[in-house]
Amino acid sequence: MQHTLQLTLAPEIALDDDNFRRFVIQKLRLRESDNPFIRKTRQSIDARSRQVKINVQAEVYVGEAPPALAGTRIVYPDVSKRPQALIIGCGPAGMFAALRLIELGIKPVLFERGKDVRTRRRDLAAINKDHHVNPESNYCFGEGGAGTYSDGKLYTRSNKRGDIRRVLEIFVAHSASEQILIDTHPHIGTNKLPVVVAEMRESILKAGGEIHFDTKVTDLIVRDNRITGVVTNDKDEHTGIGVILATGHSARDIYELLHAKNILIESKSFAMGVRIEHPQNTIDKIQYHCEVDRGPYLPAASYSLVTQTRYKGVQRGVFSFCMCPGGFIVPAATASGEVVVNGMSPSRRDSPYANSGMVVTIEDADLVPYKEFGPMAGLQLQRELEQAACKLAGATQTAPAQLAVDFVKGRTSAHLRDTSYQPGLQSVDLYDVLPGHIAFPLRDALSDFGRKMRGYLSNDAQLIGVESRTSSPVRIPRERETCEHPQIKGLFPCGEGAGYAGGIMSAAMDGERCAEQLAKLYAGVPA
C-alpha cells in the first residue's frame, strides 16, 4: 500500500525525523508494528507569516518495497579506444560534458590549469594565511571549478536548459546526499563537494577518459576555420574531433587568446559591487520573525533582494547575489595585486555569519572610457576595480571594508565588525574604490532594502569589497541549436565562462548539451 501526503507543518514536526515519523503514522492511523517506510520527496520553508511553516511532500509504503528515490542508474562504458574530444576546464561544465561524452561513446580528454581538489587546498590556505595568490590554483581555478570551494548551491531557474533532476541524480550517484533531491533550494556544501568532484573524476578515469592537471592550454590549433586541437604549456599538441571550451568566468587569458587569433568574442552584461556581511542571527530574526534566535529546527535563514535605482538619469538594477547563510567570505583573486571576494557555505551552514553579494548592473555607458579594449572593455573595468581594492587596503589580500550605515551616510568607519574573511579587513571609504555608477546606486539600494527588511541596514552590517566576478563580462558566441561557434567549426563555447550559465547546475546542464551537439555533429551520434 502506498500513500502520498501533502503537508504543512510546524518546524519542530517537519524538521525532526522522529517527530515527523510519529505524526505521519498517527495521521494515517498506522501502527509502528506495520513498519511503514516513510520518506520526504519535497520540502520547502514558508516564512511569509509570523508563524514559519514547512511544506512537505512525502511518500509512505506499507507492506511493499519503495522504489529508489534516485532513478538514474548510469553505466559508463569503456571509451579508452574511442575517438576523443578535448575539454578545456574541469569545472561543472567540463566534468558533466565529459560524463555525457562517455555515455555517447566518445573519449573525453580534459585539461585543467589548476590542481586536483585535494592538492588545491594548500593553495587556498596560502591565500588565506599568507596572502599568496597562485595564479593557476586558487578559489577559481582547479578541479571542480569555482563552485567546489565557494559554496555548492544547486538551485537554478534554468528549467528549460536541461534535465535538472538528472543532474542532481548524477551528483547523488557520486556520493552527494539524497537530500538535494528533496530540498527546494538544494545545497551540497563546500566541505562535501570536493568528495563528490573526486568521485566524478574517478568515473571519468575508469571509463578510459583522461584528465591532465597543472596543464594550461596556451594555443588553439585552427586550420581553415576548423579547430583540430590545442597546445598546452608543456608544448604538447593534442588533437580531437571537437573542443569544448569550459574555462569559467575568470580565465581572462583565454579571452585574450581568442581575441589575438581574431576568433569572435563579444561583450555581455554583468554586475559588480561588494559583499555584505551580517551576523546570521540578525538575518534569522528578520526572516523568521523571532525575538531571540531561530531555535533548534530551522536552518540558517537566507534572503533575496532586488530594486531599481537611478544614477545620472539612467535606471540601475541592484540585487543580492549568491547569498550564503551560515557562511564565509573568501578571497577569490586569480592574480597578485588584486582583491576579489566571494561567498561560500559549509553543508551545515553553521557559521555565525551571513553574507551575500550586493551588486549593480553595468551599463554600456560605463564602458565608454574603455572602448579601446573592444569586447574586453568589461574585463578592464573589472581589473581596475580589483586593483584599486588591493592598493587601498594595503596591497595584500586584506579587503577594504566599511560599515553599511557609514557607507550610506558617507563617512569612513572608525572601527569594523568581526568577520568571516580570514585575510582580514581594512577600514576604507568604499567611495574611493567603487566608481560613482556603482557606489551611488548601491547606497540608494541599501536604504531601500533597510525599509523592506527592518534591521537589514544597521550597525551590524558591513560591506566588504570587491564582488566583481558575478559573471563573465565577455560572451563567446555560438549557434543557438548546435552550440558551435559561428566562425570556428568544432569549437563549442560552454558554461559560465562562455556566457551561457550562472552557477553549478546551469553550467552542468550546458556541459551536457554541448557534449550532445559535438557527438551529433562529429561522431554521428543522435543527440
Image (spheres, helix red, strand yellow):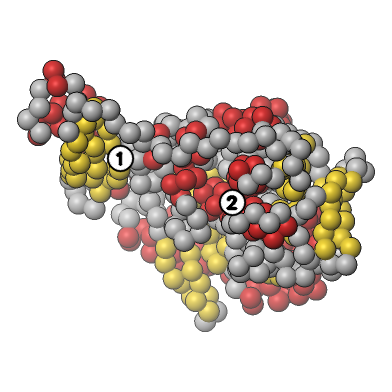
Whole-percent x and y of residue 287? 30, 48
Whole-percent x and y of residue 232? 86, 45
Q: Residue at x 31, y 54 (%)?
A: 454
Amino acid on which disc 1 is placed: Thr
Secondary structure of the residue carrying tag 1 is strand
Residue 107's quadrant in the figure?
Answer: top right
Q: Nearer the viewer, residue 109 or 384?
A: 109
The Cα atoms of the two marked residues, 1 and 2, are separated by 26 Å
Q: Nearer the viewer, residue 199 or 335?
A: 199
Residue 409 disc label: none
Q: Is residue 356 above or below residue 173?
A: below
Whole-percent x and y of residue 404? 47, 53
Q: Is residue 295 left or right of residue 32?
A: right
Q: Quadrant of the C terminus?
A: bottom right
Reading the image, the residue beneath label 2 is 512
Reading the image, the residue beneath label 1 is 41
Mark nearer the viewer, 1 or 2:
2
Amino acid on which disc 2 is placed: Glu
Residue 360's quadrant in the figure?
Answer: bottom right
Q: Quadrant of the N terminus?
A: top left
Q: Residue at x 18, y 21 (%)?
A: 35
Q: Nearer the viewer, residue 229 or 20?
A: 229
Q: Residue at x 76, y 38 (%)?
A: 81
Q: Residues within 10 Å of mark 2 (few under 14, many from 20)?
A: many
Secondary structure of the residue carrying tag 2 is helix
Q: Is residue 515 left or right of residue 502?
A: right
Q: Nearer the viewer, residue 411 or 67?
A: 67
Viewer can see residue 341: no
Q: Residue at x 71, y 43 (%)?
A: 108
Viewer can see residue 212: yes
